[in-house]
Structures are given as C-alpha cells and as structure tokens.
Image (cartoon, rainbow, N blue to C red):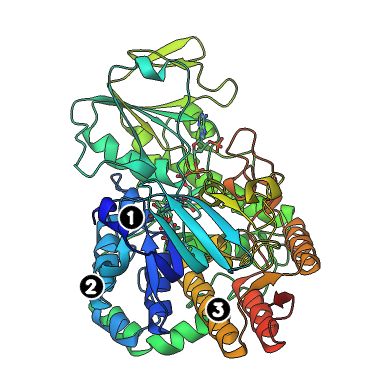
Amino acid sequence: MNSEKLKKIDHKYDVIVVGAGFAGLYALHRLRGEGLKVKVIEKGSDLGGTWYWNKYPGCRCDVESLEYSFSFCEDLQQEWEWPEKYSAQNDILNYANFVAKKFDLRKDILFDTKVMAASFTETENTWKIETDSGCIFQCNFCVLASGNLSEPQMPNFAGLESFEGNWYHTGLWPINKVDFSGRRVGLIGTGSSGIQTAPEVAKQASELFVFQRTANFSLPGRNHDSDPDTVKIHKSQYRQRRIAALETPFGIGGYPPPTQSALEVTDEERDRIFEEKWQEGGTISFLYSFNDLLTNKESNEFASEFVRQKIREKVHDTETAELLCPTTHPIGTKRLVLDNGYYEIFNQPHVNLVDISKNGISNITKNGVVAGSTEYKVDALIFAMGFDAMTGSINNINICNHKGEYLSDKWKYGPLTYLGLMTAGFPNIFFVTGPQSPGVKSQMILSIEQHVDWIADCIKYMESNGNKMINPLKKSEELWVKHVTDVANDTLYPMGNSWYQGANIKGKTRVFMPYVGGFQKYRAKLNAVVSARYEGFDFN
Ligand code: FAD
Ligand code: N01
C-alpha cells in the first residue's frame, strides 16, 4: 500500500495489532470476527513471523506439527495436511499463508511498516501509533503480537566490517537460497538454531568450524514423514486431544505426566526409562521420564549424564566428545534442542569444533575469525546467536503512557506484568504470550490462542459494560511478578544461563521471565480472574 496515500486518510481503528506472525494472524481473525475495525502492522514484507524470518537450512519446529497448529477452527485442522512429524520452516510458512487465505486476512495487514512508537492519551482513551513510513494510526486498543523471539541479537565483534566474505544471521535469513558448496564456513552459536543448521551446512561446506561458547544438550529429532494412519486417528480425536492439552503443563497432549521421581527407582530401571524416551524422541517426552528432572538437581544429573554418555558414544574423538558434553547447566534449564544428526557431524573430517568457552571470539578479520591465538580462515559466517528474547520487540517500540512514562524505563530491571497480559500504568495495551506468561514454555500456538481469546473477550466485556479503559492494579502486578519469581526459584531453571533470564544479552538485567508453573495452572488462574469480573484490573 502506498504510504503517501495512507497519510491522507483517517487511520482510526478499534484495534491495532503489531506483528503478523501466528499471534497477529489469529488476533486479526478473532477481533475482526467480533465486529471490530482492526489493522495489523508488520515490519516484514510478508506474514508468518518466526517462520518468515528464520529461513536457515534445517529450520523446523520441535513440537509435533499435529500439535503445533491452530485449534480454533475444526475445518482448518481437518483440512491441513502436514508432510512430516516435525515440519520444516517452509511447510509451516505455507500453513500460515493457507490460514491467511482461508480467513481472508491479508487485506487488513500493512507490510513493510515498522511500529516505532505508541503513546496513550487518557482523555480520548486512544493510542497513537507511529510508524517508520510516517503514517500515524489511532486506536482504542493496541495488541503487541510482536513476538518473543523476533529481535535477533546482532553480532558486534570487532572487525566484522572488514570481513570479505558473506555473513548471515539465522533469524534474518535471506529469501534466496544460500549455497555453501565448496566454501569454508564459520558457525557461531550452538543453541537450537545453530544445532539445527550445522548438519545441513556440513553437507555443503568444504570445511565447517563450529564455535561453541557453551555446550548444549540436544536429543535426536527422529523426524519422519507423516504416517497416514496416525494422522487419521489423530484427526478423528482432534477436538478431545486439544481439550486434553489444555490440562497439561506444556499445552501438549499425548504425554502422560510422570508420577515417580528419578530417585525412587533402581539404576537399571532409570536407565531403561531414559533409553525408552531417548528412542521415542521429543524433548517433552524425555523431560517427562520422571517428575522431578526440573526440580531436583540429583535427579536431573542422572538425565544429564545419560545424555552425555550418548554424546560420548556418538562422537569418536574423545576430546571433541568431552567438549560437546554440557557441564555448566542442568539438562532442560536452557531450551532443550532436537537435532537431525548434530553430534554425528563431528566425525566428519571437514567439521571442527572450536571451544571458545574461556575467551570467546577476539575479533573478525577480512579472512575469518580469531579465537585464542588462532585465525580460522572462512569464506562465510553464520551467526546463530539468538534473540533479545521476550522483551526485545516490546522495548524496541517507544511506548509512552499518558503521564509521559516510558515502558522501557519501567522495565529497566526486568519486565513487570500482570499475568503476562498487561502492565500497570499503561492502559489498553495487551501483550500476546508476554513475559511472565507460560507462552515460551508451552506449545506456543495454543498460548497465542488463549491470550487472543482472553483479549477479545475482555474487549467485549468492556463494551457491554460501557468501559473505555482497562489497567491492571499495581498491587496485582506486584503479586504476580513475585509469584512468577517464586515458582521459578522452586525449579532448576535459574541455573541455566539462558535467554529465559536474559543471560544471552550483554548488559540485560537477569530476571527469570517465563511463568514455569505450567500452562494448566496458568489457565485456571486466568479463568478465575475472569470469573471474578476481571479481578486485579481497574476499569473506567
Ligand atoms: P512472531 O512469529 O515472532 O511474529 C512477530 C512479528 O512481529 C514478526 O513478524 C515481526 O517482524 C513483527 N514485529 C516485531 N516488532 C515489530 C514492530 N515494531 N513493527 C512491526 N512489526 C513488528 N514454538 C513452539 O511452540 N514450537 C516450536 O517448535 C517452535 N519452533 C521455533 C523455531 C524457531 C527458529 C524460532 C525462532 C521460534 C520457534 N518457536 C516455537 C517459537 C515461535 O516464535 C512461536 O511458536 C510463534 O511462531 C510465535 O508467533 P508470534 O506471532 O507470537 O511471534
Ligand atoms: O538462540 P540461543 P537460538 N559469542 O540463544 C551463542 C527457539 N528455536 O536462535 O549459550 C559466541 O538459544 C550462545 O552461547 P551461550 C527456541 O526456543 C527453536 O539458537 O550464551 N557465542 C548460544 O550458543 C530457542 O531456544 C528451534 O554461551 C555467542 C547461541 O549463540 C530460541 O528459539 C530452532 C555469543 C544462541 O543460542 C533461540 O534459539 C531455533 C557471542 N557473543 C530456535 N552470543 C526449534 O528447533 C551468543 N552466543 C524448534
């Protein structure tokens, strides 16, 4: 759409939604269905969010596709066919486009437009939304569907500007296929993105250097083509399965919660159970081996050591194997990775692991990467360095309330929200799967649906009561933040230097951001709040 033309019209909306990933798409569908005038603003040139930006080779989901998909429309979930158990980025992007077409969403999405600022006027109960095209929008409600993992952490290594090869960030991958054939490649980062892409890059590169700052736990993906009989049965039970998923900690059905501690069984029995789960595949399945892997250090150590032993079996060179064995965090406290033959690539002569745990990368030269006293000569660099997670995309928008206070100032020492949905003092602006909600610790599309439904119901409730403004009470926010922290402190999660607590970003305040009490408990809390006429919120 032509921005000059846009400037001339009156951009008044009931709701402005920022972001056209799964959250933005569902928010548009649901809110428009309530008769509201809605516009989605997306900085990318197309929809899909995560699955639009992360086009790196090997990218796929780690939650089974039959689960990682929308549940709001029975026709949709019956109609769509997933080619694989864990679908590849391209198939998930195709799905997002299919959803957009089915529900005619594109006409209300403005692409190539970044929201720069949002300011609230109390007298009019409106948010003024400013964009990089100069277009200004007004709305009664703003929904930030801007993503938890959408603000890539860009490399700022000294000398990067002098590098004569091409470099890429996994979270900003170019649309055109990148060919690494015959090239020497350096890969920096061994989180999910780095571990997923390494085997694919190794297939092409003449030499691959994997720069590892922290060894990470990864389980075999055991991906395969969809089995028609399994799909048929799953689809015949879809509705019941989706309902059952609501009562689980991760919002994913099909995994009976464990009932016993890893300390209650014999060594043989423990190993038998780990082995069974290892063979089955899937991160939740493995973490569900016992009920205390994320709460008891001793139990966790059994699981951690089981996986370390698997790494030692897979990787022939003992020194490399030991370097790949994680020792600095309990398994599961950083996001557990599912891979497609990651450890095995280190048995290939052209793949090298470079341990940078002590001194990191010193600098980048025109020819490659310097770590320690060695210059590793490469023709291309891949940065798989993750994201300014959970708060990055929100803090990047200059959000200012009617008192002239900025949200980024309020959140300087970590996010403060009530239920991960709103923050006190900033009326009528909602987060989808925001910090202090279980979003990133769940099947995220389910959490997206839950939040969007909550927001839509809340706006309808306000309409029916003649309310124009909703604002969480400061006290409710304080209690919720404390609860989120207390719950996290009862687990081993704080022991992992992860993006869950901002540890991957230099200078970011370390505070544990997701709610890890379980999706089912959070859901019960949201339902109770609504039943008590939106307890903890103030309406005007
Ligand atoms: P996003 O998909 O991140 O979309 C947010 C959108 O907002 C983006 O398009 C962004 O460009 C836009 N935006 C941000 N700021 C602005 C602004 N200021 N102005 C305009 N537009 C803006 N979750 C799972 O549950 N299972 C998985 O298997 C899984 N795999 C993943 C794999 C990868 C590689 C990554 C990075 C994440 C994965 N996730 C997974 C998490 C994933 O992010 C969510 O599942 C889901 O796709 C998030 O959707 P969203 O719409 O909330 O956010
Ligand atoms: O990012 P990460 P990601 N010098 O933050 C390293 C989802 N996801 O993009 O561990 C050198 O996990 C950093 O090292 P360290 C999923 O939720 C899912 O991989 O901080 N190295 C780490 O190794 C995931 O958790 C899938 O010491 C530096 C890596 O970069 C989330 O997205 C696939 C560095 C970053 O790992 C983020 O994953 C992909 C530096 N200066 C993503 N800075 C699925 O499979 C950082 N690192 C579903």
Spatial CA distance of label 1 from label 2 is 27 Å
Q: Secondary structure at mark 3?
A: helix
Q: Are marks 1 and 2 in contact (CB under 8 Å)?
A: no
Q: Are marks 2 and 3 in contact (CB under 8 Å)?
A: no
Which badge, 2 or 3, comes first in the chain's sequence?
2
Residue 126 image-quadrant placement:
bottom right
Residue 260: x and y in percent read: 68, 72
Residue 285: tell me if it is visible: no
Which badge, 1 or 2, comes first in the chain's sequence?
1
Which quadrant holds the C terminus?
Answer: bottom right
Residue drawn at the location 64% of the way across and 39% of the way down? 508
**Three-letter code for the amino acid on which mark 3 is drawn:** Trp
Q: Between 189 and 481, which is closer to the camera in this rendering?
A: 481
Which badge, 1 or 3, comes first in the chain's sequence?
1
Residue drawn at the location 40% of the way across and 20% of the way down? 160
Q: Disc 3, ligand 1: is the CB inside 8 Å? A: no
Spatial CA distance of label 1 from label 3 is 32 Å
Residue 61 image-quadrant placement:
bottom left
Residue 357: tell me if it is visible: yes
Residue 98 image-quadrant placement:
bottom left
Q: In this figure, which residue is indicated by the disc labeled 2?
A: 101
Q: Secondary structure at mark 1?
A: helix
Q: Seen in the image, is 431 located left or right of residue 377?
A: right
Q: Which of the labelled discs sits on residue 454, or is there none?
A: 3
Name above or below for residue 523 compared with residue 497.
below
**Three-letter code for the amino acid on which mark 2 is drawn:** Lys
Q: Which of the labelled discs sits on residue 463, or is there none?
A: none
Which quadrant holds the N terminus?
Answer: bottom left
Q: In this figure, which residue is indicated by the disc labeled 1?
A: 7
Residue 289: x and y in percent read: 58, 66
State which mark lies toward you, 1 or 3: 1
Q: Seen in the image, is 241 located left or right of residue 539?
A: left
